[in-house]
Every structure is written in structure tokens, then in C-alpha cells.
Image (spheres, helix red, strand yellow):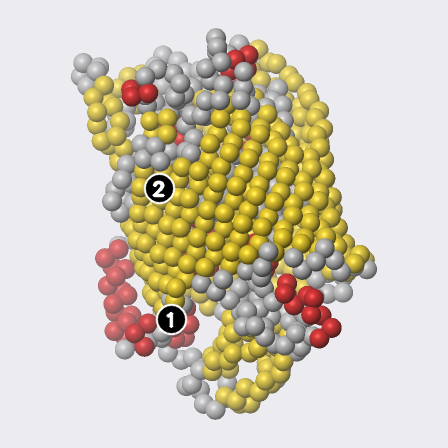
Amino acid sequence: MAKNYFKSEMLYFEKVGSKKVICILFFSLLTSSFLYSQTVKVSGVVTDNLGIPLFQSHLQIQELNKNAVTNEDGKFTFKKIPKGKYSLKVSYIGFKTNYQTIDVLDEKTNIKLTIQLKPEQNQLNEVTLEGKSTVQRLRESTANVSVLQMEKFRERNINTSDIVKQISGVNVRQTGGFGSDAKIYVNGMTGKSVPFFLDGIPLSYFGAGLGLNVLPSNLIEQIEVYKGVVPVDLGADALGGAINIVPRKSYSDYLDVSYSAGSFNSHKMSVNAQLMSSDNQWMFGVNSFFNHSDNSYKVDVEIPNEQGNPKPARVKRFHDKYSNHLLNIYAGVLDKKYADRLVLSARYSGLDDDIQHNAIMAQPYGEATYSESTVGTSLEYEKKNILKKMNMKWYSAYNRTRGHFIDTTLNAYTWDGKIYRKRTDGGEISTSRNSLKLTSQSVLNRVNLNYHPWKKGKFTLNLFSSWFRRVGEDPIAAEFYGEDFFKNPTQLFKNALGIAYEHRFSKKLTSYTAAKHFWLDADGYEIKNLDFVPNQQETSNFGFLQSLRYHLTKSFLVKSSYEYATRLPDEVELFGDFTLIKSNPFLEPEQSHNLNLGFQLKTKKVNWDTNLFYRGTNNVIWLRTSQFYSQYQNLLKSRTLGVDMELHYRPVDFLDIKTNATYQDLRNRSPKSITGAVDNRYFNARLPNIPYFFGNAEVRYHKENFLHTKNTISAWWSANYVNEFYLFWAVDGNKDLKNTIPSQFTQNLGITLSRPENRWTVTAEATNICNEKVFDNFSVQRPGRAFYITLRTFIN
């Protein structure tokens, strides 16, 4: 049987014909040998007295000194248990420790257990909270937050940005295919107003090679989307929400290897491994990935004919390859007197990007490129009760990034990749031409303190500080300008301080109050009319938030929140990227009044969430785009009213049905003095080029022991809908003749088959199966139908 299995796998790889899968084949052969020579597996689930799964319960087989921790579903697994009789210890905070005897009679019959823990009699008030998973407690907190667990996405070829847009109130728009810039819209807020965090640290500090749109799902435990209000634990300024990516933090040995190949010459590979000591006192691990795509999907464009007249054509995108990579090595100690967790990490990441066109897809580029590499190190420290009733988390990091932007050719290209003329001067993007080398450094530090002076109250203090410096050199541009302006350094200091108090008045009512202070000191410049214009500014702003949560019944709760939010401009908005974005060191901070009212219902089969929101924003920082360059500017005042809804229905254990929809009405509230118009016709007009109605749906079938075998099967259908919207102001010109982004409805299909013990997984999926024409920012066309195969092995 095993021999036939290996033969079929070899035939498959010969058909694929890719040398890049050889290492994956090695792991599959190694894994398959385990499958046919395994010892007994002891698995099961741990619940409370009400049958609710207990997340992170600790289990230990005492005679073998083997340890396990339950997952979000309360499940655990011990593998390779030899014949014998053992004592199993199960413990969880707030519950009585449970002892069970495991009798392994032979090495062929696996053992399944259901363990129910009883609450401690003197901690009844805490049982309701402790008996729920961490995810459920976060969903039921005072924060208006949506949580998406990543376990089901780890076997798939899917970008993190495409996962995020499955959350209600969230829309993602990209400037092309894989690796292109992604803009996130959360309840009407977009761009830098919704920052990304990696475990509470702004993602931008880790380099472009670790952007949200290219971060592999294998590295992520869950994604948290905060809407309207942002807790002080996320230590940076944010205007209308935030997205926090929680990385995987396993405390067991494991090897996780995956490889994916598909349309447009796309390849994704990741290798993650961790080694724990037998007493769980220290660990060593590696995270790594490599992604590549040619992005050679077809687009509809216009190409000049022999007479120079533009003619419609459908061609493959050219010069749009993108690759990114990461190698992260970490080591640390756990459960010491001086630290619960102390981890030192060193990483190297980078990217290589062919620049295909400008922001509005009006001009193709055939040779402009950008490459980047980042070297960084970080230290994480966690300690509970560092002082009496006080917990501490500390994070410190240093990053050094080198980037190289090349735009030197005199060739001008058409959309079919042909040279149609040669210019006498200038590059494809810049008038000076560029061979620009940039070196940037950043230092950041975060301290988070939680103080529990009494049972019903908790104080949180979060201090985040960062320093950024960038300098460059460009001998080609220096010949054009007469001097090398890029040698002038730009510097940015930012500091965010937050203090919060959470109080539980009763089992039903909880309050969260916070105050924030933000400070910025920037030294920059812009090149205006061939002149060097320096600028220095210092800004200080306050913020405030108040949120409440009230349980009307055990299964139904109401949330309300208000935040006066401030967001300071970041280094790219102030100093540009010296490629497609010009500097604007004179930007002012954004401010917004955010109101939210949410309702949440949770039963055994139904989860329902609805959120009403209002945003009143001043000094909106937006990206003004032209044919040749982009620049961030302060312009609009806006008002947003909206509602989002999400419904999750599970009629039976093996079937999940999810759907969500969002309606957001964004209106300009700027007078003509700000818009530059001759009258006030733009006042209260809907903001253009922003979707106002969109939604998602998914039906998933998941069955263990499929057809009475040891295999597990998952199959799904998902869809995304965006209603049509105007590309420019609706109040200008004849509406019937205006440019619109048409309504879009895309569908995806996929199936995953897992071999015994999930050590071998194969996934086949098709995206945009009807090959719908999909548009995004400024009418940029997105990929059509695509197919992918993903192989994964996971050993622990």
C-alpha cells in the first residue's frame, strides 16, 4: 500500500515538473514513513462543567513527562505513547485539577478522552470568564472587535489581505496582483488611518517584505480587527480602527512545511520549526518563507496601432514579478523566576519588485524596479506578578533597511511589452532618472503594564516610542539637480502613551476608559522646483475613549463606544518613498470623533453581530494621485454613517455558513474654501472611488473520519460582492456618462484532504472561478481565474 502511495505521488510531481518541490517530496516521504509505523495516539477534549471547551488547559502524562496544551476548541493530542499504564494530570485556572489513568493495552488502538473540569467553589465569579476561549472573551469584551482564527487557512494559497476582507466592515483594495500595495477600509476609514500591528507592534517597522498583503498565514494564530476604538495595548496612533496580527506561539516541538504552486507562475514555500526542552524551560525555533509570482494575468488595455491611434487589446501583464522572503531565528527561556517568557530573535527579510505601472494604470513601465532588505533583532520579555498584582510585557527592536530604486532607461513601453520609442531624457517615472540607494534605521520600544488592585478593576499603561532615520545617495539624480539632495537625512521621533482603566461593575456591565497622548518630532524636506526646502515640525495631541458592554441575557449583549482619535503622519507620508510618492513634510495630524453601537447574539448554532457607526473626521490625509506621481495631502473633512452585520450559522457539526454585509455612507463636509471649487456643490457629496456597499459569504463542509477512514476533508465555496461606485465625483457632469467601477461578484472553490493525524495535507482551490473582470484602486484591474495546489506537512 505504501509503495503504491509513493508511486502515485511521484507521478504527480513529474506532471507538475517543478524542481522547487523536491524538498517538499522529501518531507512527504519522511512523513509517510511515520504514518505506517506510529505508536498509540492519546487525544481528546477538555471542557468545563457546562461543556464549553477550555482553551490552554495544561495536561501532563507524569510518568513520561509529556506535556500538552489545548487549542481554541479544547482539543489536545499526545503522540507516540508506548504500551503501559500512566497518570494524566489536567489543570486550568479556576478549576479543580483532574487526574485520570490511561491504560495503553496495545500499540494499535488509539485512545480518545473527554475530560470535564469542575470549578473551584471559591471562584464561582470567575468561572464565566475562564470557561470561555480567549477569542470568545475578546469578542465579548468592551472593544468593538472582530476576530478571525487562522487555523483553517494554513493549508491554502491565500494572501492575508484576502483573508482580512472576509470580516464584516472590512474591504481590501490592491493596486494589482500578489505583492501590490493593499489599502484596508474599516468602517469608512482607510489608508494609514487603519494601522497594522504584529503582536501590538506597528507592522511598518518590520520592512516592506513583511507587509499585510504578503504575510503567510502559517505564521499567524489569529487576526483581530478593531473598529472605531483602539485599546491602549496597541501602542500607536490610529484614527478609526486597527488590525492586529497575533503570531503563532506554540509551546511544543513541531515542524510545519508547506509548498504551493499555481497560476501566473506563483510559488509559495514556508518552513517553520520549533524545538522545546523536555521540561519546557527553553525553546529554539525558525520561521522562514519564500514567495514569488510573475503576476502575468491578462488585462484589458489600449495599445497604439501603426497610425498611433489607441486600440483595445487584451494582453498579459509584463514586468510585474514580485518576490519576498523571511528568515527568522529565535531562542528563549520559559517559566523562570525572572521571566515567564524571554525570547531573542534575529531576522532577515526582503523583496524584489518590478514596477509595472503608475497608480491609475495609465502608463506601463518596462524596466523600473525596487528591491529591499531588512536586518533586525528584537527582545521580548513577559513576567506576571513582577510586582504584587502587576504584570509586565516589554518589547525592544532594532531594524536596518536598505532599498534600491532603479529608473534609468530611456525606453518607453506599450502594454504588450514592446518598445515604441526612446526618450531623450528622464526615466519612466522620474524626470531626473534614478539609481537611488536608501538606508533607513529604526529603533522601537514598548512597555505594557497591567495592574489588578482589586478583583473588579484593572489598570493598563502602555508606552510606545520609536525613532526613524533615513539617508540616501543617487549619483544619477545628482547630475540632474546639481547636487545629491538624497544625502540629506530625514528623521522622525514618535511617542504614544496610553492609560486605561477597566471596571466590571457586575457580571453584566463592564466599562473601559482610556486617555492617550501622542507626540511627534520630524525633520524632513521636499524638492520643489529644483530647490531644497527643509522643514521641521513638532506636534502634540491627546485622545480619549470610553466603551461599555452590557449583557442583556446570557447569550445577548450590547456594546457602545466613543473615541476622540488622533493619528500623526508617518515617515512615508511626510518624507515620501522617493519612488512613486513625493514628500510632504508639512502634513498635519488627522482627528476623528468615532461612535459605535453594537449588538451580539451567541447561541449553540448561531452567532450574530451588528454594528452601527459614525465617523466625523478632520484634516483627512489622503493620497492625491496624478499620471506621474502621488503625494499625501491634508484636504477633506468627512462624515461617515454606516452599519455592518455578520451571521454565522452552524446547523450541524460538519457545516458552517457565514455571511456579512456592510453599508457605509461617506460624505464630504468640506466647504469650497478647502476643496478649491467655485461653489459648494461638493459639500455633502459622496466621496468618490470608495465602495459603499459590499459583502462576503462562505459555506464550508468539514468532516473527520470521512467515509469511515482516518482522513479529514474540508470543502468550501466563498463569494465576494462589491456594488458599483463612481470613480470621480458624482455631482460633476452627466451621471449616465460618468466612469464607474462596475459591480463585482467573485466566487472561489476549494477542497482540502488531510492524511492521518494531519501530517499530510493536500489542497486544491480555484479563485474567481467565473473569470469576472475585477477592478480596484483607480480602476486598476485585478487577476482573473486562477488555480492553486498546496501541499503541507505538520509534525509535532
Q: Is residue 777 visible?
A: yes
Location of residue 248 in the rendering, given as x and y in whole percent from the top left corner:
54, 57
Location of residue 714 in the rendering, given as x and y in whole percent from the top left corner:
35, 63
Q: Residue at x 55, y 56 (%)?
A: 556
Q: Nearer the viewer, residue 224 or 552?
A: 552
Spatial distance from mark 1 to mark 2, Cα to Cα? 31 Å
Q: Amino acid at mark 1?
A: Glu
Q: Are marks 1 and 2 in contact (CB under 8 Å)?
A: no
Quadrant assignment, res 47: bottom right
Which element carries disc 1, helix, strand or loop? loop
Location of residue 588 in the rendering, given as x and y in whole percent from the top left corner:
63, 23
- Left or right: 52 with respect to 654? right
Task: Bin the neighbour count of mark 1 within 10 Å (Cα to Cα): few under 14, some 14-19, many 20 and up.
Answer: some
Residue located beneath label 1 in the image? 704
Q: Residue at x 71, y 51 (%)?
A: 502
Q: Quick one: which residue is furthest to the left in this view?
A: 306
Location of residue 155 in the rendering, given as x and y in whole percent from the top left corner:
40, 58
Residue located beneath label 2 in the image? 721
Quick one: label 1 or label 2, which is nearer the N terminus? 1
